[in-house]
Amino acid sequence: MTTFEKRHERRPGGPGADADAGPEAAVRPEAARGPEALARLDALTRRLRRECPWDREQDERSIVPHTVEEAYELADAASSGDDAKLLDELGDVLFQVHFLSLLMEERGAGDLAAVAEHCADKLVRRHPHVFGETEAADAAAVLRNWDAIKRTEDGAGEGALPDNLPATIYARKVQRRAAAAGETQPELEASLDRVTEQAGRLRSAAGGRAAEAETLGELLYAAVGAARALGTDAELALREAANRRRRAGPEAP
């Protein structure tokens, strides 16, 4: 039993027992297959690492581009409504997790169990409204607590924000961090006013292409803020808009 399992073990009638647990708390037959299936995937990953020339040559830097590609394919499957495709892409991402964990294990930096335990501990720590005494009335309160907890953790400052995130996601994270630090975030009407203001500035922008690009950036940043005020993900909204245009064809207005 792992440290996490010992810490959160539920004993009938004892601490951690859920007196109100209903049928959903029982382990489903599908879930019971999980450990065996994951053990098989782990064994396959190790064999590929030993016996496949391509897999033997990989390290973190060479494999990560494939990880990113698989993550994008997973996102596409999730938005497509195709469960068979989603299952397939989830498997590809899961293999990436196993493979990268194995690379860590080889140099003594961790292993799959350490990855899982670290993730579980972090989820418990960042959900005090579930595992502690903190209250969260709605999803917005959950996000505020999450951001506040992240700021107390090592490595969770501004330097932990990856520079290579898609621009709309990067902007959203910057805005969320500003809100968590106490900066007042505009409501929907004020956000839309900022979009309108930046659009007006773009129409009258002077100073060449650099000035136009800067103003356009401010407009897009304001649009991400409007999306946040709407409770919508700007990245997904933009992708859906592009897909609608793509499906409509070149003759669409």
Image (tube, helix red, strand yellow):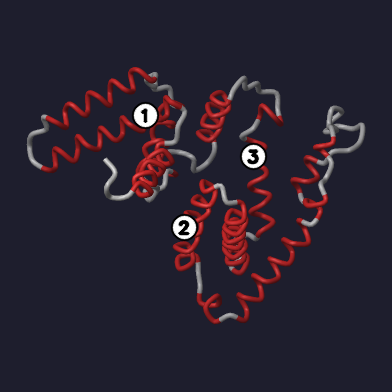
Q: Is residue 219 left or right of residue 7?
A: left
Circle 3 or circle 2, nearest the eye: 2
Crowd class of label 3 (few under 14; some 14 to 19; many from 20; radius 10 Å): some
User: Considering the image in quadrants, where does the C terminus appear?
Assistant: top left
Q: Residue at x 62, y 79 (%)?
A: 50
Q: Which residue is mark 1?
A: 225
Callout 1 secondary element: helix
Query: Of the residues under marks 1 and 2, which one precedes in the sequence?
Result: 2
Q: Is residue 142 above or below residue 103?
A: above
Circle 3 or circle 1, nearest the eye: 1
* Residue 16 pos. (x, y %): 82, 33
Please state which of residues 250 and 182 is positioned toward the viewer in this rendering: 250
Crowd class of label 1 (few under 14; some 14 to 19; many from 20; radius 10 Å): many
> What is the distance, in whole Å, between disc 1 and disc 2 at their CAs?
26 Å
Query: Of the residues under marks 3 and 1, which one precedes in the sequence?
Result: 3
Callout 3 secondary element: helix
* Residue 69 pos. (x, y %): 46, 59
* Residue 23 pos. (x, y %): 84, 36
Q: Is residue 198 visible?
A: yes
Q: Which residue is mark 3?
A: 123
Specify the amino acid type for callout 2: Val
Specify the amino acid type for callout 1: Gly
* Residue 170 pos. (x, y %): 38, 41
Q: Is residue 183 left or right of residue 103?
A: left
Q: Quadrant of residue 42?
A: bottom right
Q: Residue at x 35, y 46 (%)?
A: 248
Q: Which residue is mark 2?
A: 68
Please state which of residues 61 and 19 is positioned toward the viewer in this rendering: 19
Q: Quadrant of residue 238?
A: top left
